Image (tube, rainbow, N blue to C red):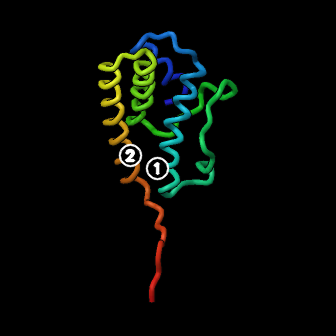
């Protein structure tokens, strides 16, 4: 899923008046979490070494980190942020639960597909 697809789908599922820049900030926020918790802790390529930052200069076709079929987490994340900004607590809790479930599934997949980076904390003879 790319940036535009995530924003469009979230807007279709939850019509709102939130500015695009706020949505880009929220997508940056969650992709940085994914980057730090998953990408950097598992084997990755040199192209994956750059921490994501989405702003008005970023191409709308930029692919987000989590691939399909786990990419709905971006839509649920945006929907939960919209609910939070609108102070709709019950809707927020529902969308947050959907996000948490999608994130857990994506995280589990990531861990199955990529070898964790082994770090030695202590070595004794």
Where, by quadrant of the figure, is residue 83 drawn?
top left
Task: Give x and y (percent) for residue 63.
Answer: 55, 34
| Direction right: furthest residue | 57
Measured from the top left, where is residue 39 in percent x and y? 50, 50
Q: Residues within 10 Å of mark 1 (few under 14, many from 20)?
A: many
Residue appearing at x 46%, y 49% in the figure: 37
Can you name the residue that lies furthest to the bottom here? 125
Question: Residue at coordinates 59% horizontally, 31% vertically from top-left?
Answer: 62
> Which quarter of the image is occupied by the C terminus?
bottom left
Mark nearer the N terminus (2 vs 1): 1
Q: Give percent across and percent down for residue 64.
A: 52, 35
* Vertical side of 51 occupied by 102: above or below: above
> Which residue is tagged 2?
107
Considering the numbered disc 1 on the image, is that residue within a helix, a strand or a loop?
helix
Circle 2 residues within 10 Å: few <14, some 14–19, many ≥20: some
The circle drawn on residue 70 is none
Where is residue 21 drawn, in percent x and y? 60, 21
Q: Is residue 68 left or right of residue 44?
A: left
Left or right placement of residue 6 versus residue 113 in this view: right
Seen in the picture, residue 85 relative to 122 is either above or below; the reply is above
**Tag 2 secondary structure:** helix
Q: Residue at x 44, y 24 (%)?
A: 81
Q: Count the marks.
A: 2
Relative vertical location of residue 39 with respect to residue 80 in this rendering, above or below: below
Q: Contact (CB < 8 A) between labels 2 and 1?
A: yes
Q: Residue at x 48, y 24 (%)?
A: 6
Compare residues 74 and 84 and report the one nearer the observer.
84
Residue 38: give its label. Answer: 1
Disc 2 from disc 1: Cα separation: 7 Å
């Amino acid at each position: 899923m790319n940036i535009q697809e995530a924003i469009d789908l979230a807007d279709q599922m939850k019509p709102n008046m939130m500015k695009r820049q706020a949505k880009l900030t929220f997508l940056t926020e969650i992709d940085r979490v994914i980057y730090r918790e998953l990408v950097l802790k598992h084997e990755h390529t040199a192209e994956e070494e750059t921490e994501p930052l989405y702003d008005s200069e970023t191409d709308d076709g930029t692919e987000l980190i989590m691939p399909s079929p786990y990419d709905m987490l971006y839509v649920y994340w945006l929907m939960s942020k919209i609910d939070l900004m609108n102070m709709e607590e019950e809707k927020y809790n529902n969308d947050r639960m959907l996000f948490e479930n999608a994130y857990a599934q994506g995280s589990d997949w990531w861990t199955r597909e990529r070898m964790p980076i082994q770090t030695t904390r202590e070595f004794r003879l």
